[in-house]
Image (cartoon, grey):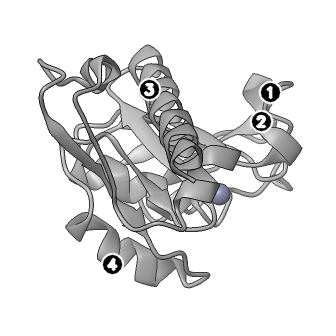
């Protein structure tokens, strides 16, 4: 998570939705518990005590975490800006099949066709929140924002991390496959 990019969140309450998310601009390799903010489903900060530094702000991307929590079984959402996901997002939806590593996304067999959604990026977060549910599903635990990066989720921290790693394997594979063809 280079250059303080990306954000990590974990669901605390389901009804109404409340989750902890990394504050904007923090080095993700040096996080402490004070770098997580409690927010509601609208991404608004919930102040839990005076000790919490109120100068920290949740990222504008908080709403996309909230949308993932609302529309999937996710309890943990990780968002990373990686070279391969950004590079491949310039292509349309990414399709993978017959790869053993697909099992790491929860598929029972490698013999499946998996399409990872690529969604046009926008600075209008409300627009993204509105269109996101039509792209995401329970089958594929993530999506790419074009020219931006990957969102992946899971029911636990370990599962979300595994999904990020599997997605990154697939993206690395695709970049190398495309370069072999040229
Ligand atoms: Zn981002």
Answer yes or no: do the residues labelled 3 and 1 have beta carbons within 8 Å? no
Q: Which numbered mark, 3 or 1, is in the foreground of this view?
A: 3
Alpha carbon of mark 3 to alpha carbon of mark 2: how far?
Answer: 27 Å
Q: Position of residue 124 (x, y in %)?
A: 55, 84
Q: Nearer the viewer, residue 131 or 84?
A: 84
Alpha carbon of mark 4 to alpha carbon of mark 3: how far?
Answer: 27 Å
Q: Secondary structure at mark 1?
A: loop
Judged from this view, the residue extending furthest toward the front is: 182
- Circle 2 Cα neighbour tier, 10 Å, few/some/many (<14 / 14–19 / ≥20): many
Q: Position of residue 107 (x, y in %)?
A: 17, 24
Q: Which label's residue is closer to the chain start, 4 or 3?
A: 4
Q: Which residue is mark 3?
A: 166
Q: Quadrant of residue 51?
A: top right
Measuring 87% from the left and 46% from the top, which residue is drawn there? 3
Q: Which residue is mark 1?
A: 31
97 relative position to 182: left or right:
left
Judge whether 127 appears above or below 149 on screen.
below
175 relative position to 92: left or right:
right
Q: Which numbered mark, 4 or 3, is in the foreground of this view?
A: 3
Quadrant holding the C terminus:
bottom right
Q: Which numbered marker is on residue 35?
A: 2
Q: Which residue is mark 4?
A: 130
Q: Which label's residue is closer to the chain start, 3 or 2?
A: 2
Q: Quadrant of residue 49?
A: top right
């Amino acid at each position: 998570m280079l250059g303080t990019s990306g954000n990590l969140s974990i669901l605390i309450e389901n009804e109404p939705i409340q989750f902890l998310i990394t504050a904007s601009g923090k080095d993700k390799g040096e996080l402490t518990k004070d770098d997580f903010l409690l927010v509601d489903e609208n991404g608004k900060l919930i102040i839990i005590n005076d000790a919490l530094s109120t100068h920290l702000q949740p990222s504008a991307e908080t709403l996309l975490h909230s949308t993932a929590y609302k529309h999937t079984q996710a309890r943990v959402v990780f968002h990373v800006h990686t070279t391969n996901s950004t590079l491949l997002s310039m292509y349309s939806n990414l399709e993978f099949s017959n790869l053993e590593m697909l099992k790491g996304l929860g598929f029972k067999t490698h013999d499946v066709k998996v399409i990872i959604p690529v969604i046009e990026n926008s600075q209008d977060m409300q627009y993204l929140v509105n269109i996101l549910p039509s792209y995401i599903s329970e089958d594929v635990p993530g999506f790419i924002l074009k020219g931006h990066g990957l969102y992946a989720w899971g029911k636990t921290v370990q599962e979300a991390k595994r999904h990020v790693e599997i997605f990154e394997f697939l993206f690395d594979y695709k970049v190398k496959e495309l370069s072999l063809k040229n």
